[in-house]
Structures are given as C-alpha cells and as structure tokens.
Image (spheres, rainbow, N blue to C red):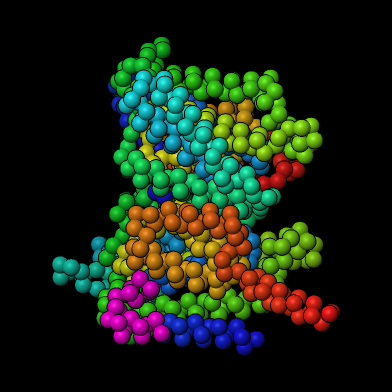
Amino acid sequence: MQFGSIRYNTDTPELLFRYGMNWEFFFQYIIAGITYGTIYAVVAIGFNIIYNATGIINFAQGEFVMIGGMTAVTFSHFMPLPFAIASAVLVTMITGGVIEILFIRWLYKPSVIRMIIITIGLSILIREMSMHIWGESVRALPYFTGTSVSSINLGGVYISPQVVWVVGISAIAVVCLNFFFSYTLLGRQMRACSANRDAARLCGINAGNMVTLSFMLSAAIGALAGCVVSPITYVQYDSGTPLAIKGFTVAILGGLGNSMAAVGAGMILGVLESFSIWIMPAAYKDAISITILLLILFLRPSGIFGSAEVSRLKEF
Amino acid sequence: MRAKYLQLFVFAGLLVVIQLITMFTGSVYHLTQLTMTAYYSLLIIGLCMLIGYAGQISLGHAGFFAIGGYISAFLTTYDLTPHQEKVIISLIKKTGILVSRPDLYGGSLINLHPWAACMIAILTTIAIAYIIGGPVLKLKGHYLAMATLGFGIIVYRIVIGTELLGAADGISGVPGFSLLPGVVISGSSAFRVKNYYTSWGLVIAAMALLINLIHSRIGRALSSIHGAEDAADAMGIPTAEYKLKTFVLSAALASLAGVLLTHYNGGIGPSEASVMKSVRYVAIVAIGGMANLWGALFMSLLLNYLSLRGYFGTFDDAVFGAILIIIMLFAPDGLLRKKTISDIKRLFARNTAEKEML
C-alpha cells in the first residue's frame, strides 16, 4: 500500500501564472479548495452513513471511491458517459452490499478493534484485486463538458467546467440524501436504527437489512464522488486510501455522524490545504491535512461543530 | 519460574538447528532473509507487548522503524569533510565519535560513528514517542487507530518528500556497524553466520526482557488495563503512565530494529515507512494471538521469512490483507492462542471430573 498523493490538476498553477493578479490568485486557490473540499465532504458523508448505522468506521471507504472511478472508466469505453457513471455507481453499490453481507452481517457484537482490522484488511484486498484487474496505470474519465484547457470566466476568475460538475453533482447528491433520510420511510427506518437499534427492531424494522443498505448507500455516494472527480485528480488502484484519510479528517472535523457539518468541514480542509502550498512545499501537503487531523483528535475530538457532552456518551 | 527461560533455551536450540540445516544442505543464503526476519521480529514482539498486553493498537510502528533507520542512515552517510573547519564539528571530533573511511573514489569521508548514530536515533525515537504518546494514548478505538495511522503517514510523507533523505530513492551506502570488536552488522557474506546469531541473540535478549516484564507487577497491571481500564484506574494503577511507557518501549524496539536492519541492508527506502508495513506488523501480531509473545515471534519468523524469500510473489500485500480478515472473522484470538491449550486441558479435566462424579 503505497500512499501516493492525490494528483492535482497540473494546469491550475499555470492558469494562476497566466492570469496572475493577486486577488485572482486568491480566488483560484479558493476555487481549488472548494473543489477538493466537496469531494472530501462526500467521502466524509460516506463514513458517517456507515458510522451512524453500525458505530464502525469503514477503513475501506476510500476504496469505494476508487472502484467507482475505475469501473466508470472501463464502462465509458462501451457506453455513453452518463450510463457508464450510473453503471459504475450501481456496481460499487452492489460491491458494498456484498462486502457487508460477507464480512460484517453475521458477526455477533464485534469489538471495535476487530472491525478496524477487518475493514483495513478489506481495503488492502480490494486495492490488491484492483491492481491485478486494472494494472498500475493511471486512468481518468474525459471531462464531462469541454476539455482540460477550457474554462469559464467568472468575473476574472477562471474555473474549469469540471469544477462546476463536481460541486453541482455533489450538492445534488447531498440534498437528495438529506431528503431521503428526512422524508422517505426507508430513510427514517435507517435513522431509527442508528438512534436505537433495539427500539427500531421492536417497531418491526429489520435492522440487519438497514446496515446492508447503509453500506450500499455509502458505497454509491463514494463511487459517485470517484466518477465526478476522476477527470481532475485521475484514479489509480491506490488512490483510495489518501482520499479516505482526508474524508475521515473531515468527518472528525465536523463531528462524527453529522453529515451537514461534514460539508462545512470539507470546505475548511480543502481551502486550508490549497493555501498550504503557499507556505510549504507541495510534497508535504498530505502531511498537513493529517497534522490537522491529529490536532483535532488531541484537542477537540467532538469536532468543531459537535458538542463535547454528546461525544462523551458515544462509543468510539 | 524455570519454564519461561526453558522456552528461550529451546528457541535458541531451534535457531542453531536451522543454521546447521542450512549449512549441511548448502543453502546458507537463507540466513540472509532469516537475519532480516530477526530484526522485524524485534519490532513485532515490542508491538505485541503494546497491542496484546496493554491493549493499545498502533498502525504507525513502521514510522518508528523508519525514524530509527533513517536517522542512523543519514548520520552515518552524511559527509562532514566540507564542514571540518567549523568549531562545532572540531569539538565533536575531539570526543572521538567521528570516523573517517575511504569512499569509492579513493578520497575519505568523515561520518559519525555508528554507535553514536544509533544512540541518537533511538533517543530521538524515544523523545518522539513520548511527545506524541501522551495525547495519542488518551484516544480509544477508531480514534487511536486513525491517530497512529496518521502518524505513520506523516513520517512516510516527510521521508518521501525530503531531498536530504533521498526522497523516493532512500539512503544507500550505509556502512557496517561494528557492534563489538569482531561483530560487524553488515550484509557481506563473510559475516553471514555471525550476523544471524547476533540478530537472533538480540531477539532472545529482548524476549527475556519482555517475558520478565509480563510476569512482573507491571505486566499484571498492563493486562488489567487491557481487561478494564476504568477498573484498573480505580484500583490505583497509573494507567496513563503504564500505557505511555509500553508505547515508548515498543517504539524504542522498533527504532533499534530499524537502525540494525538499515546497517545490515546497507540502506533504507521510503517503503519501510509505508502504512502497509505497519498493517503487516499488526497482522502478524493478530495471527500470533495478540497477547502471546511466542505466537507473535513464531508467526513473524514464518511469515516474514516467506515474504522476504518472495514466496507470495505479487500477492505479498494481498496475503497479509487476507490473513487479517480471515483471522479476525474466524479466530479473533489468533491461531496460536494460549487458550487453545487450556481449553483442551479443561476438556480433559471435565472428563475426569465427570468420571469421578460417576
């Protein structure tokens, strides 16, 4: 497991130099930060869905993103882009469900350490399998609209059309998820299970199925993130883990289990990270976000939006 | 009391037998991998102490291994000749810890003596472990796992991003480490057998130390922390202090392993700091039965040796991933758990007890 850093769009700095006014510089960094922040937030929401349903952190969350991106690239050779993405999301969703059924469903009250080790093992296995299936080459989906050099001018700030796609699709996904959890019967059943599993069971909800569903949902949203971001960051068999670490940082930053706070936290981390290039060499960029993670864990494990009292009652 | 040392003697005997087998079958080259295995085992028994006995998971021990290895590699290869005139260097030189050795082109290099480098490396690791151990060990469960994983990744990122440490290539050309007169830790085949016994001798010494620790007051305190931390705290055991000390001890062992393996291999690369390595160490401790030093040692001997000989091919990482999952799904107490023996004993005991009842 080599922790390759996420590849950043190399033409962004070029754009910066070409149109280098100081304010525009600033906004370009903000835009880059928001783009990555959006993806981190979506990965964090994936963590939260599973955490809420089961109380475990799925260390293989980043692999869902990778599988989504990889299968979408493969499918895009045979069908139009929207169908390829839809099928990739479906495939990853099924993978997520199968993983839950095979490795998690039948365990009786597993300890936290056991679940950590199992999901880490899963992430390694998925990554190694992908390496044998897809090889070590770097892949990417084509830009949804335009090309890598086309840009939209927003009052002097140039943004890639893909950025609009990333932010737009992620925003729609988050709104849909929110709707699903608040207003549909299934979503409410899932929330009931996460609030109190035994009480939900007494009401006739099949808690086991809800956990499977949470894995599928989490895999699906991860895969969607993997698809929309792959034209910018590219995707490779080992690109899942760094994303998972960032996503986890964001989930903690917002407070575990709180999906709306994760969106805000994602923006904060994305922007911080993109400005960190100003002071630190880019090679240390990943180290910065992990340092932030450690600082939050040490100083305020309930997250910047969470309350310390509530988190003390939770089991980690 | 005797029994615990008897095991050590039996193990030492086994090592002699292995050496004799390789000698008589003319496959002495196997000893190279076995020596490397010994150094990894040094780390693994320390980690076993932390995970199994103190109950604190660490997914960042490759980081400590790399800190030790990189510091000693850097200090023993960094040429001080251009800085010779500086006051501080000449002061250091007077203490006698600098050595000069010929380089490839007939000139001479001035480096720090490996003993001094080793001491600096281990002391630095201990300091780092103390500093991060305090806040990290306050965390539990997922947070502890993620924090240690994060530490490992930071070390990896720094190592791979720093030119001075050779970036992606790592540091090579590390000289041998003359531990004692006549005992040089280096990869040259002339010292192969000596190195084999030196490395495993160190492992046995560390095992003796840890076994004594487990059977002492501290060991019992640690297992009570593992069982129920709050209860241990209520009984007056300084839980935070004991956890921290075990963490530092295991980090120091990891660092020592890193230093020695770096001298043995003549270099170190960033892959030694990668998270996969940390996960692999945890996998070995898990399959050995978590709180079972001997289990961890035997599994380390077997799996590291097979992996280093390349038996797993391109599935190297996948094998360790699969081991982790299978063990945690079906035998969360590990394969070589102590309970297996006591279970069998109890089975027999029950049978006899039932017979007596009849």
Q: Position of residue A247 (x, y in %)?
A: 53, 37
- Decide if residue B82 is on the left or right side of residue B42: left
In the picture, the quarter occupied by the N terminus of chain B is bottom right
Q: Main secondary structure of the magenta part?
A: helix
Magenta-colored stretch includes residue B105? no
Residue B287 in view (yes/no): yes
- Decide if residue A86 is on the left or right side of residue B228: left
Does residue A240 sit above or below B317 in this rendering?
above
Magenta-colored stretch includes residue B31? yes
Tell me which residue sits at (79%, 80%) in the image. Answer: B355
Closest to the observer, B315 or B170: B315
- Decide if residue B99 is on the left or right side of residue A288: left
Please identify the quarter of the rendering in which residue B65 is found: bottom left
Q: Which residues are magenta?
A: B17-35
- Decide if residue A187 is on the left or right side of residue B28: right
Q: Position of residue B28 (x, y in %)?
A: 30, 79
Q: Position of residue B71 (x, y in %)?
A: 40, 62
Tell me which residue sits at (45%, 83%) in the image. Answer: B14
Q: Residue furthest left?
A: B105
Tell me which residue sits at (39%, 57%) in the image. Answer: B316
